[in-house]
Image: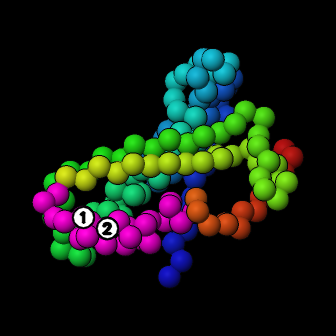
Amino acid sequence: MVKLFKVNSVWLEGTQIESETRGFKLLLDKPEDESGTNLGPKPAEVTLQALGGCLIFAYLYAAQRLEVAIEGLKIEIEGEIIPGGWTDENDKKHTGFKTVNFKIEVKTKHSQEELQKVHDLALKASPMYDTLVSPVNVTGSFTIQ
C-alpha cells in the first residue's frame, strides 16, 4: 500500500516560509548572515533534522525487532553544502549537500556485534536515509495566477 505525504509551503514575507503538514506548522527562514531574520531553520537544516529523527525511529524499531535493549540514543549530523555549488566526478554541477556525516551514540549493555546488527537493520529501515543515498524521481510544475 502506497502512503502519500503532503506538505504545503507558503512564502510569508522576506525570507520567511510557513510549511504545514497534518496541521503542524513550521516556520522556515535563513540566518541573519544570509540576509534572513533567523526565526526558523533553513530547509537544509530541516532535512538533517528529518534524517536524525528517522534514524532514531529506525534504531528503536530495529532494536525491538532484534531484542536489543537501548537505554539512550543521540545522533549528531553534519551536512556540507558548498556556496555556489560543486562539480562531481562526472562533471555534473550540484547545489545540494556534498557530504552528510552522522555519528550515533547508543547507550546499551549489548555487544558491539549485536549493535552492528541493529545499525544495519536501522539503515535498511530508514526512509530518510534511503532518500538521501538513493536517486529519487522528483518532478514538478508551476502555474501562473
Q: Do the residues labelled 1 and 2 touch (CB within 8 Å)?
A: yes
Q: Is mark 1 on a helix, strand or loop?
A: helix
Helix, strand or loop at disc 2?
helix
Q: Give the range drawn in magenta.
A: 108-131
Q: Residue 40: x, y in percent? A: 51, 29
Residue 124 on the magenta segment: yes
Q: Quadrant of residue 79?
A: top right
Name the mark on residue 116: 2
Answer left or right for 78 relative to 98: left
- Give the answer, above or below, for where 100 lies relative to 117: above
Q: Quadrant of the C terminus?
A: top right
Residue lying at 59% horizontally and 29% vertically, measured from the top left? 29
Pick the front one: 108 or 71 = 108
Q: In this view, does 42 lie to the left or right of 88?
A: left
In percent of width and height, residue 102 lies at 44, 49
Q: Is residue 116 above or below residue 91?
A: below
